[in-house]
């Protein structure tokens, strides 16, 4: 797949006096550096041709993503179709980034895996009982950094 002309493979690909490209493709290492600080993402699942987007709190460890959930439609969807995507983004000053993680979800059932996941500091927003842990192993990472500007 070719990269459009306005997208750079290298975030540092600019020189003095030359405007920075408005969109930069992030490397996997750059994406993981951003992911390490993420605590919130959106989960995308599919159920009978309908896409569902769910906000959730996450943790990252060993290049995998983790979240805690209660039994319900989100967990059922992941058990029936383990392919999922996570999306996270941020805007700071004149710059933004957006990342999509395409991967495979797995309900943690092994006691050692659950105990380890419980130490990752996942903090749900709601004070509800969430006993299940899910791990998402990425198959593909896609990220872009944007230099924000004004039209005018």
Image (cartoon, helix red, strand yellow):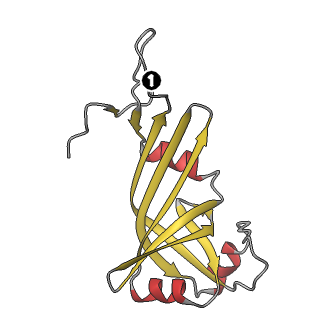
List the single residue furthest toward the front: 152
**What residue appears at the point 44 percent right and 9 percent down from the top-left corner?**
17
Q: Measured along the vertical axis of the image, is residue 103 above or below residue 148?
A: below
Give the secondary structure at mark 1: loop
In terms of depth relative to the viewer, which is nearer, 34 or 137?
A: 34
In terms of depth relative to the viewer, which is nearer, 150 or 62?
A: 150
Which x, y percent locates residue 57?
65, 67
User: Relative to residue 93, is residue 82 drawn left or right?
Assistant: left
Displayed quadrant of residue 21: top left
**What residue appears at the point 25 percent right and 31 percent down from the top-left corner?**
5
**What residue appears at the point 61 percent right and 52 percent down from the top-left corner?**
36
Q: Measured along the vertical axis of the image, is residue 31 above or below residue 134?
A: above
**What residue appears at the point 34 percent right and 34 percent down from the top-left corner?**
9
Which x, y percent locates residue 44?
45, 71
User: Relative to residue 8, is residue 29 drawn left or right?
Assistant: right
Q: Measured along the vertical axis of the image, is residue 30 above or below residue 8?
A: below
Q: Which residue is mark 1?
A: 152
Displayed quadrant of residue 6: top left
Q: Residues within 10 Å of mark 1 (few under 14, many from 20)?
A: few
Which x, y percent locates residue 107?
53, 83
Which x, y percent locates residue 87?
49, 59
In terms of depth relative to the viewer, which is nearer, 140 or 75?
A: 75
List the single residue furthest toward the left: 1
User: Relative to residue 81, is residue 121 drawn left or right?
Assistant: right
- Quarter of the picture containing the C terminus is top left
């Amino acid at each position: 797949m070719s990269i459009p002309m306005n997208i750079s493979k290298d975030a540092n690909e600019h020189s003095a006096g030359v405007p920075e490209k408005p969109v930069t493709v992030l490397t996997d290492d750059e994406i993981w550096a951003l992911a390490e600080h993420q605590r919130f993402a959106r989960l995308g699942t599919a159920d009978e041709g309908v896409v569902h987007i769910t906000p959730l709190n996450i943790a990252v460890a060993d290049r995998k993503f983790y979240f805690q959930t209660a039994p319900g439609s989100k967990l059922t969807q992941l058990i029936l179709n383990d392919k999922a995507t996570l999306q996270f983004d941020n805007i700071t000053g004149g710059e933004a980034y957006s990342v999509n993680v395409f991967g495979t979800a797995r309900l943690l059932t092994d006691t050692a895996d659950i105990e380890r996941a419980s130490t990752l500091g996942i903090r749900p927003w709601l004070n509800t009982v969430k006993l299940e842990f899910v791990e998402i192993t990425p198959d593909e990472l896609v990220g872009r950094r944007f230099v924000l500007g004004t039209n005018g």
